[in-house]
Image (cartoon, grey):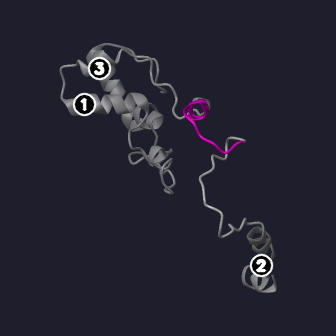
Amino acid sequence: MGLIKNLFGHLQMENICQLYILKQWEEDKWIWSLNAKGKLNCKIAYNYLKGIQIEEKGPDLNWNSLWGLNVLPRIKIFAWELLWGRLPTSSYVSKFSKINPSSCYLCKKEEDNLSHIFFKCPFSGAFWDKAELLLNYKFTYRDK
């Protein structure tokens, strides 16, 4: 014990001493830690997965109308990623990596995310202003 404590410290020594040492004649086996008996079956896995919220429910849209548009496939895919919130903004990419979200590439004022890029950034605001004039339509869902 003294050697372990000298090498690793007191806290690590306690953790090491709590490890279960498999006896040579015991066969190693897999144990499902979320079940009292340590067994995994389809019902247990289904109930476990049902309890996990993996992804928010997607937008309530008629997806066939998107996929049926007469536009280039890359535009359909862009629209699909946009509607699901999966465009590779720095705030989205930071969910899956150790990269911290960066500020907007255009205005450098706010975090780079979909809401800012498409609705709050002054540069996108100029686009929406032009679109309103060209389409003779007032967009009500954006900040001015």
Q: Which residue in the structure is indicated by mark 3?
A: 66
Mark 1 or mark 2, which is nearer the start of the sequence? 2
Q: Residues within 10 Å of mark 3 (few under 14, many from 20)?
A: some
Q: In whole angstroms, how far apart are the C-alphas of marks 2 and 3?
A: 60 Å
Q: Residue at x 72, y 65 (%)?
A: 20
Q: Residue at x 81, y 85 (%)?
A: 2
Q: Which quadrant holds residue 28?
A: bottom right
Circle 2 sits in a helix, a strand or a loop, which is it?
loop
Q: Is residue 78 magenta?
A: no
Disc number lying in front (1 or 3) = 3
Q: Are marks 1 and 3 in contact (CB under 8 Å)?
A: no
Q: Is residue 38 magenta?
A: yes
Q: Which residue in the structure is indicated by mark 1?
A: 75
| Magenta-tinted stretch | 37-49
Q: Position of residue 60 (x, y in %)?
A: 44, 17
Q: Residue at x 48, y 54 (%)?
A: 97
Q: Residues within 10 Å of mark 1 (few under 14, many from 20)?
A: some
Q: Position of residue 19 (x, y in %)?
A: 73, 66
Three-letter code, disc 2: Gly
- Left or right of 31: which side holds 10? right
Q: Which residue in the structure is indicated by mark 2?
A: 9
Q: Are marks 2 and 1 in contact (CB under 8 Å)?
A: no
